[in-house]
Amino acid sequence: MTAVADARAGVSPTPAAPRASWGTARTVLRLHRSALLVWALFVAGLSGWLVWLAEVTAKAELKALETCDRAGQDWCDVTMVGLPGYQAGVDLVGLLVSYLFLGVAAFAGGALIGRELGDGTAHLAWTQGISPTRWLTAKLGVAALVVTAGGTVLVLVYRWAYDEDLLFSEWMGDSTYLSRGPATLAYALCALAVGALTALLLRRPLPALGVSVVATETLSFVVAQYRGSFWPAVTLTSAREDFDYPVTAWNVESGALVHGRQVPYFDVTSCYGGSAARTQGCLDDLGVTGFYTTYHPESHFWPINLVETGIVLAVAALATTAAFLLLRRRAA
């Protein structure tokens, strides 16, 4: 009724909430357009580099290897066929992609939230019709959308460019493991939330920047220590120390069976070096009845990565909730 009456009286109706929200989001984009440009160049640059590595470098190296095979050489010097070029390039891109969350944390704590709290522009915005909740929602929402879009592109292009035939990287290595799955995006979103929370706590950009980076790096380190337990591993036992398991497997733990109990990293090297009878007698004296090894096959990549993604997103949700509660308390 009010909108109809306003229209009849020649008065423009009050803007709708979605339109106001879009205006706030547009303000965030305009305010941080320099950071947006840097992020776009970062994503485009790494994506272009991966395309070059896959379409030019990798094909040249495969052709060189085929030439070696036709020449009847049993082994080719990798420096002669150029393997380090593709290997080093993919490893470096993987490192940058897997640790991009540190840059997100620095930006969130320093520029996105910390700077506006430090110089008072946030309070000025709150006095001009933008509530603190809507201000933080726009900040985090726009940043999360931009980070997710760019991170998704990088992960997909990295997976496309990843050629196991030319790489010596292990799938469980930090750079390869994170760059090939959604855990990278989870860490970036978590860094965004932690950066915002840190900025609201410290209210100064530089300290918030430093603490955000340290906090997210610590989280990454702690989670990595428990990565092997995120999914049930495969355990093999044998009377001898040699095991037949996939070459690409991630060996989590190995040890001896002492009186039927698994003892990790049990040293029996002193028992070897003599006759078989002496070796067996030494093992019997130690109570060693066999050996075991616990590993993850490469097929466990997705379950482990998805579990880690869920854990990190849960931390991100907690940090986001804490940030909004803290903002509401301080703005009251």
Image: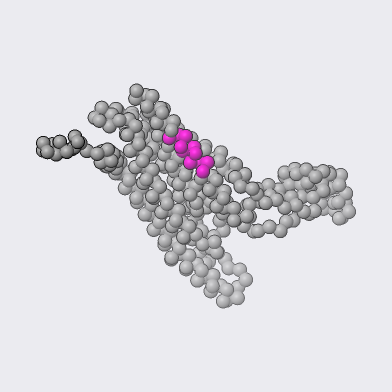
Q: Nearer the viewer, residue 81 or 115?
A: 115
- Does residue 261 appear in this view? yes
Locate the N terminus by quadrant. Answer: top left
Q: Is residue 125 magenta?
A: no
Residue 269 in view of the camera? no
Q: Where, by quadrant of the figure, is residue 24 drawn?
A: top left
Q: Residue furthest front?
A: 1
In this view of the protein, which residue sits in the foreground, 141 or 39?
141
Picture coordinates of residue 184, whole percent (x, y): 47, 47
The part of the chain drawn in magenta is 310-320
Q: How many marks?
A: 0
Q: Quadrant of the C terminus?
A: top left
Among the 4 quarters of the image, the one containing residue 51: bottom left
Q: Name the residue located 45 percent from the left edge and 63 percent from the top edge.
A: 54
Dominant SS type (magenta): helix
Q: Position of residue 68 (x, y in %)?
A: 56, 72
Task: Identify the residue at horizontal 39%, vertical 50% (top origin).
Answer: 150
